[in-house]
Image: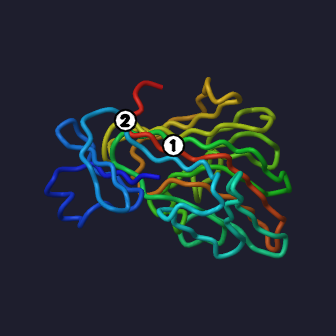
Amino acid sequence: MIRILRGTEAQRIALGGLQPGRAMLCTDSLKTYIGTASGDIETTGGSSGFLDNFNDGARYWAWNDAPKNGSITETGTYLELKGTAAQDCNWWGAGVDDAPVAFIGTHTCPMEAITKLIFHTTNPNSQSGMYISNAPLLGGNSGYLVARDEAQHIIVSQLGVGNIADSGGVIALPVWLRIRTRGEGNGNITDFHYSIDGITYISLISVNNLPHRGVGLFSKNWSTPGPEIIGRFDFFSITLDPGPS
């Protein structure tokens, strides 16, 4: 596994080395560094990124968790986010963070995050998928999610607001979910897509000026208690400077 940081040499030194799963300040004049547990190396070009295949039975250390209720488990085959019927696993808007959520810090530069959802319980009021937010531990009212819902549709929701896009029909599993950002800083555009084959992606909606702070995976319900939720993910990846869609 790798860590990524993008910035000037002075900024890198000021940060005291790489921070887990974080990149920053993407411009052509800045450098990209790839990090390991022992240090970091300047790269000379090409895309950099993060990949977790969930194939070793152990969580990658850069992941952050917000599992007040429920559990987050890597089995060696997939990552499972689960909440039982007795648990309140809501996650909706600022200040509500009771669902199992796993995330890493994100970037102010163009990037692409992809996951493959391989299992999802379709109990009432349940969703599993990927999200991007300015406050990943709290949801954040400027955060958005792309997910499979209880009707087996792929939806995009704005946290604290509600659904803003819908596939309009049942999408069978597995399904690939993708979030792409274009532009830099808070003057960006965020695109939400899904795919049934991992090759051709279908656009759901684009959102302007989302301040990014974290991107990750979640499962949630919004009933008290329950119902049970289970979301299983085959992999999660981030690519910097992904190029055209």
Residue 33, placed above or below residue 44: below
CB under 8 Å between discs 2 and 1: no
Q: Residues within 10 Å of mark 1 (few under 14, many from 20)?
A: many
Does 169 sit above or below residue 101?
above
Rendered position, 72 above or below 176: below
Q: Say left or right for 183 vs 165.
A: left
Residue 209 position in % (x across, y down)? 39, 45
Name the residue: 64% across, 76% down. Answer: 68
Camera-nearest label, 2 or 1: 2
| Number of marks in picture | 2
Name the secondary structure under disc 1: strand
Question: In whole angstroms, how far apart are the C-alphas of marks 2 and 1?
Answer: 13 Å
Toward which corner of the image does residue 21 lie, by quadrant? Answer: bottom left
- Is residue 230 placed above or below 42 in the rendered structure? below
Which comes sooner in the sequence, label 2 or label 1? 2
Which amino acid, mark 2?
A: Ser
Q: Residue, x 71% and y 69% (percent of image)? A: 89
State the residue position of label 1: 113
The colour scheme applied to this rendered structure is: rainbow
Q: Which amino acid, by three-letter code, is at mark 1?
A: Ala
Q: Dot 2, how many residues are within 10 Å of its Cα: few (below 14), some (14-19), or many (20+)? A: few
When asked about the image quadrant of residue 115, the answer is: top right
Which residue is drawn at the image coordinates 55% and 38% (left, top)?
Answer: 192
Q: Which residue is mark 2?
A: 47
Horizontally, is 124 left or right of 64 in the view?
right
Left or right of 232 in this view: 201: left
Q: Secondary structure at mark 2?
A: loop
